[in-house]
Amino acid sequence: MRIGAFTLDSRVSLLTEKLSSPLRVPREGTIERMLESSGSCIVKDIKSGIWIADLQLVRCPVCDLSTCDGTMQTLDVRHIELFLNEGYKNGSWEYNLIASHKLQKDAVAACGAIFDLKHLKSSSSYDSQPKAMIAPHAVAVHTRLQENEGIVVKYQTMKVGTDGDIVSIRISQQLL
């Protein structure tokens, strides 16, 4: 499902699995440490410009019920110029897992958000209960969940080559 487009200006973003107020910006450490302490992480070297956001709900491969809402949610964002690059077209650019975080308790919702750090305090960047929300400098998704045993949150990025700018980001939550 297409959510819309937003802008990243600062080349530094906050990726988070929590939408509670106030958002805490982790200050130091590895991405894994940041996730452990706050459920959020800072990602640098992001290509600035316009980004397109999609929400994907994926059904469990064992289940074929038309009423099933799916067992995995993915917030998929990519720079608007991604599809113009030969490295993307020929498949030489791949997603890399930058961190994984497991919540082993009943999760009432699966949330994921990307905020341009420069504009984080802007009132237009934050909404506490979106299903899918786009703002000028942020995107967020929120899905209420059935009873579960927790979720696994994965953060993935795609770079231009091996050392280039990040041009695509995925935040996925899978039910346990």
Image (cartoon, helix red, strand yellow):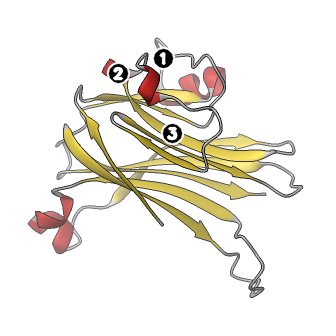
Is label 2 or label 1 in front? 2
Q: Which residue is mark 1?
A: 29
Distance from Cα at disc 2 to Cα at disc 1: 22 Å
- The first of marks 3 and 2 along the sequence is 3
Position above or below: 27 against 59: above
Residue closest to the eye, 14 or 44: 14
Q: Which residue is at 65% across, 63% downward? A: 72
Q: Percent position (x, y) of residue 159?
A: 25, 49
- The first of marks 1 and 3 along the sequence is 1
Q: Percent position (x, y) of residue 30?
A: 47, 24
- 130 left or right of 169? right
Residue closest to the eye, 152 or 70: 70
Residue 32 in view: yes
Q: Residue 119: give its label.
A: 2
Which quadrant would residue 139 be assigned to in this image? Answer: top left
Q: Residue 113: give its label.
A: 3
Q: Percent position (x, y) of residue 171?
A: 51, 49
Distance from Cα at disc 1 to Cα at disc 3: 20 Å
